[in-house]
Image: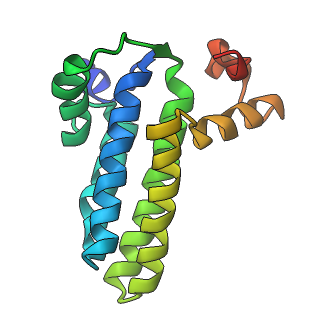
Amino acid sequence: MAKLSGLVSFPNPVNEVSARVVAGGVVLMALAGLLLRQPLVLVPLAYGFWARVLTGPKLSPLGQLATRVVTPALPAEPKPVPGPPKRFAQGIGAALTTVGLVLALAGVAAGAYVVLGVMVVFATLESVFGLCVGCKVFALLMRLGLIPEDVCEACNNLSLR
C-alpha cells in the first residue's frame, strides 16, 4: 500500500518552469489536433492530464519530458509554487479533455474541436504568460470558503506570486 500512496501523489511545491513547459506541450498537441483535423489527439491529452492529476509528472510522458529533459536544459532558475492549485488546474484539464474525447468518440467532432480550442487558449496563457486560470479559480474558491485553507496554506494569497 505504501508503494501505491507514493505513486498516487502530487508534488508540493511544483516548479513553475516545468508547469509552463508542460503547458507548452499541451498547446502544441492541441494545435496539431486542430490543424490536422485529428480530434483523437484528445486520447494522449486526456491520459496526460489524468496521469498528472494522480501522480504529478511520474506517469505522464509530457511531464517526464518537461521535468527531466526540457526544464534542466533551460537557463531559468526553478520557481517553486504551491502544488494544490496546479493539481486543481490539471483536474480541470482532465475533465475537459475527457469530455472532448467522449464527444470525438461519439462522432461529435465539432465539440471535440471546441475543447481543443479551449485547451489551446488556457494552456497558452499558462505557457507564455504564466497565467494559470485554474489556479485563479482555486484561489477564488478558497476565498469563498469552498476549499478549506488547510488544503493549501501557502495559497492564501496567490496574487503575491
Taking 161 as reference, is 66 left or right?
Answer: left
In the image, farthest residue toward the bottom: 107
The image shows residue 153, relative to residue 132, as above or below, that is above
Query: Residue 17 is drawn in which quadrant?
Result: top left
The image shows residue 160, relative to residue 122, as above or below, that is above
In the image, farthest residue toward the right: 144
Query: Residue 54 is drawn in which quadrant?
Result: top left
Q: Residue at x 34, y 30 (%)?
A: 56
Colour scheme of the rendered structure: rainbow
In the image, farthest residue toward the front: 75
Q: Count of labels shown?
A: 0
Query: Residue 65 is drawn in which quadrant?
Result: top left
Residue 127 percent across, percent down from the top left: 44, 39
Taking 130 as reference, is 25 left or right?
Answer: left
Q: Residue at x 75, y 37 (%)?
A: 141
Q: Residue at x 67, y 16 (%)?
A: 150
Q: Nearer the viewer, residue 145 or 118?
A: 118
Residue 50 shows up from this direction: no
Residue 35 shows up from this direction: yes
Q: Residue at x 48, y 34 (%)?
A: 87
Q: Quadrant of the N terminus?
A: top left
Residue 20 percent across, percent down from the top left: 40, 33
Residue 102 percent across, percent down from the top left: 39, 75
Taking 43 as reference, is 99 left or right?
Answer: right
The image shows residue 74, relative to residue 143, as above or below, that is above
Residue 22 percent across, percent down from the top left: 33, 38
Q: Quadrant of the C terminus?
A: top right
